[in-house]
Amino acid sequence: MSQRRIHQTNKRSDLRVVPGWSGAQIDLLVKEALTSPEALEKLCGHYIPRIYNYVLKRVGSVQDAEDITSMVFEKAITNLDSFDDSKASFSTWIYRIATNCITDHYRSRGRKRESPLEDEVLPVTAPGDPGLDKLDLYLGLLDLLQQLPVKYREALALRYFGHMRVSEVAETLRITESAASKRILRGLEELRRQAADGPLQELI
Amino acid sequence: MKIRARQRAIKIDESFDESNEVAAAIRSLVPPDTSMDEEVLDRMVGHLLSLQRRHLHGRQASRHHRLGTASLAAAALLVIAAVLVGVIVPAFMSGSKPAPTRSIALLGSLKGTVSVKPPGEKWQAASERAKITAGWTVKTGKGSLVSVTFPEGSIMRVSDESEAEVVTMTRRSITVEHIAGDTYHRVHTGTRYTVTNSGVRSTALGTAFNVDNRKAGKLEILSVEHAVEVEIGKHQPIRVAEGEVMLVSLNRGKEAVKQPVSREQLADSRLCANVQSDARAGYSTGIYGKLDVPLASQPEEQAPEVSSQPIALNGTVGDQGVSLDWTFSTPIKCNSLVLLRSELSEPEFPASEIARYSDTSISSAADDSIDRGHTYQYRLAALLESGEVSAYSNTVVISVNSGPALQAVSITLSASAESNGITLEWGVSGATTFTGFVVERVIQNAPGGSSTPVGTTTTKTVDSTNVFFTFQDNSVSAGYSYTYRIGLVVNGAVVYYSAPKTVDMPGL
């Protein structure tokens, strides 16, 4: 942890995000992305930053987040022709792939999150912030999340790291909104129990 | 469909977890969104576009030909998987042991016996497309070779009977420990790439160079394209430009000489094979292209030792022109010597003759009809009475700088007292055309009653064109303080002095 480096957040604001796309526009882009490099580039430009941030918040390591994000889009491209927009939105589909990749990632490491090394940076705070404590707490939170049952962990991650509405969480996990909200609440309760006697207890 | 209908039926209030303390705590800890590194994003998008092309090609091929559907898809997926596994997929895919970094390099062009050794483990046989990461060592057997492709695009080619360890490997920085034999390095632009051996560090940013320590106690760094900075110990780095070679003696102390590369060195089959591989991959051949040295028809098998020339020719360039000297390693029958010079191709007799000496005991010559900004190749031919050539020397390549001969010269000097005297070490940068050094010593402090008073100055001339030199002063006495400085000699005159260094010899 001594090698941890804190990055300034949002130091570049030139994200390649194309704002204001409707669901229909995205569906069209997905269809075109099967054959058109321009469409694929637009789609990547729109979703890579989102998926990357979601993954980064889940794994706490820039390098792992980059690798996993790449893997998510590779899987998406090789399976794009099997994507069915009548069953789920592209957003739901890509987040589902990301969730599975993250699960695989942790499984391959025996559920243990590695300490970030040099060049593997979690951008929690700007330099000069009293952010090291916050970073420790956040990394502690990730460890606690890993100890939760998968169904709670994924619901909480999509809700709080993916900033999803309940309906989106439900769609991604293929459950009802009611079940999604219950999973979130039970996950929060489980997290409170896990945090007892730990550094997060005070905060929670 | 059923689920979606039910979702519409039961709407959950989005603020259902607003008052939950745990939810609030998570929200307070979750970092804000951040931008992905632009370079990584570009590379990722480029990779995905290439993946799309391959995937599309596979689908079209299967549609048109029907047969081979599985094989095409499998091939495309294999290629994709290989690229993913090798370049992007992190190390956790390769085993249960967490690696120190997530970067992975791929072995390729494997021929013969190649072994790899993970840190703390035993040697194991390597296969084509095997993955290695930082801390791994690669070794080749007799007649074998392998290339290591780093994730950022740099390539290390390990020749036969050679060994190198990938010490560190991040996205913009690679360090390799050259252990034995030859390693050739094609460095991706922007990567800080360092090869170390026995305290000698060769660093490049976007270039191609070769490192060789096949000769005991010698390390050779040859710059094929652009330049390499060679740092010996703590001395100031010395630039080895394209077409130059630095020979570092690793035995007693460290000495180094930098000189233009000879055609014989460029003809080394291992080096040629590596530059050929570069050329096939679309890279520039650097000095080979500029000197029109042929790369083709080099044997791919074990490189034979370069046969020694009966006449060894050396050349240096100074303000007055090019100075050449030669020695005969074996007696040669000849009636005259002919100096040959050309610019674009290897000099040949009689077309390239510029001077003829009937006195065959002559061992040096000077060529003052040179132009700045030109590169000349010199060769000496020994002629029989019949006019036939009985022997050629090696070819010396001399580049005459377009600017002044000496620019921003500096000498870094270190001096240390040892039990048997004072050791001086110095390195020169910014000068390649000097002919030697003057070591100047002044007695700074002397014990009372000394027969050699303070201020006594002694000088010693060192005839050497080494850019790094070690000198031992044994004529020192206990209790004295000595101040040294090194003068750089060009054509008999000192043109530059180093900063002085004072050393105290401990009293008895």
Image (cartoon, coloured by chain):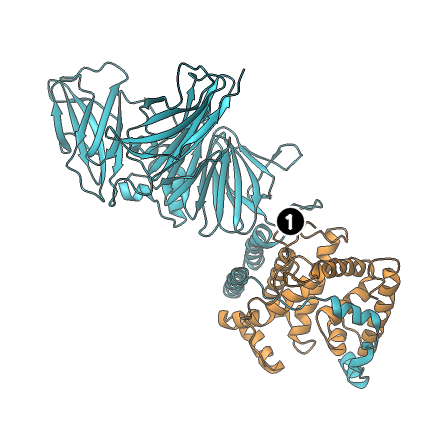
Chain colours: A orange, B cyan
The quadrant in which the N terminus of chain B is found is bottom right
Percent position (x, y) of residue A163? 71, 73
Taking A204 as reference, is A97 left or right? left
Mark 1: give few (<14), some (14-19) or many (20+) Cα within 10 Å: many
Q: Position of residue A56 (x, y in %)?
A: 67, 62
Residue B486 falls left or right of residue A57:
left
Relative to A165, say whether A70 is above or below.
above
Report whether residue A105 is seen. yes
- Residue B266 vs residue B250: left or right? left
Q: Amino acid at mark 1?
A: Ala
Residue A80 x, y percent position in the rendering: 60, 68
* Pointer 1 residue: B91
Q: Position of residue A46 (x, y in %)?
A: 58, 72
**Residue that appears at 80% across and 83% down:** B13
Q: Nearer the viewer, residue B447 or B400?
A: B447
Chain identifier of the residue bearing label 1 in the image: B
Closer to the camera in the image, B481 or B334: B481
Query: In the figure, B436 relative to B375: above or below?
Result: above
Q: Is residue B146 visible?
A: no
User: Hey, which quadrant is residue B288 in on the image?
Assistant: top left
